[in-house]
Image: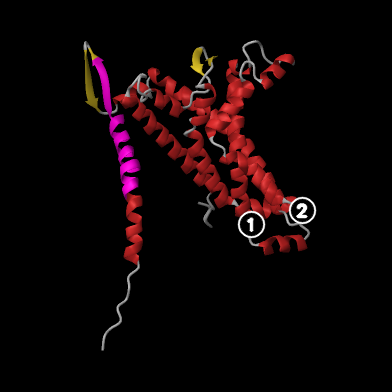
Amino acid sequence: MKKNKTVEYGKYGLMFLIPFFLVFLVFQLYPLLYTFYNSLVYSAKNGRYMTESFGLGNFTHYVFAKTGKEFWQAFIITAILWVLNFIPQILLSLILAAWFTDIKVKLKGGGIYKVIMYMPNIITAATIAVLFYSMFEVNGPLTTLFRSWGWCGKGGVLNGGWASLGIIAFIQFWMWYGNTMIVLCAGILGINPSLYEAASVDGASSKQQFFKITLPLLKPILQYTLVTSAIGGLQMYDIPQLFNDGGPVVNMNGTNINSTTTVVMLIKKYVAAGGTQDYGKAAAYSVMLFVITLIISLFFYRLTADKTNDGR
């Protein structure tokens, strides 16, 4: 009597995973490890010759010394851009998500509104940057309007550092609030409706339901939103680069700096062909950005994590 052979489907699943791991190893893991290696290779000029040493020279000279202030200036600019776009983004997304999912409101055509608000997220960053630049350039329609109101001089809106910073933050906010709203809507719809029904029976208002039920149970989604937004915000590059090329130069604490130059733009400056190439410095900046992003992400994770019974 022949025994029935069992088919092991697990091995086929592993075969489908092989391409992913190959791509990950070649295009992600290897560049990451090579970046860490380059950050420890310090090149310095000794007389007429360039010498290399293996250690923390790139960090001590370009990050934690006086010569490292360009990194911290770029990081401050990056952090300001992220804060200016994320705070209104999360507040507006929470309000809209609560509005669209409120049973009492029963908004008609809610799906259409969601699609319209999400649409800026599917437009390429290059297209949006060119669009806003054409509106705010020296002879752009909005600049001409602001000039007639006396809000800017002949140099235009983009001649002011804080104005350029605010416009870029608005572009980031406008692009991403729809995506954040959709994520929060999905999180709210995943909450058990019976909780809201019980609260309504007890006479709780929509405001009380939002703060006592929605927000506490939405913590995992808020955690995801905070962490992913922080990672994306600290790696900001495309909009500032395409919109204003990191300028204009402004005076901050007695130092002239590029008002919209982010950390990733600074890294690109030292690896781009034809530019000031210094792979060790760029790698050190990359590692520092990685460490700072990790610390901020862990802080947000800790901030939004559910506390255990012993209060930890």
By secondary structure, the bulk of the magenta-drawn segment is best described as: helix
x%, y% of residue 275?
37, 19
Q: Residue furthest bottom?
A: 1
Say which amino acid is labelled 1: Leu
With 110 as the anchor, is 12 left or right in this view? left
Give the magenta-colored segment's residue range.
Answer: 22-45
Is residue 37 a member of the stretch shown in magenta? yes
- Mark 1 to mark 2 CA distance (whole Å): 15 Å
Compared with residue 214, is residue 201 higher up or lower down, i.e. above or below?
below
The residue pinned by badge 2 equals 105
- Labels 1 and 2 touching (C-beta < 8 A): no
The residue pinned by badge 1 equals 189
x%, y% of residue 27?
34, 41
With 203 as the anchor, is 240 left or right in this view? left
Displayed quadrant of residue 25:
top left
Q: Residue at x 53, y 45 (%)?
A: 303
Disc 2 secondary structure class? loop
x%, y% of residue 308?
52, 56
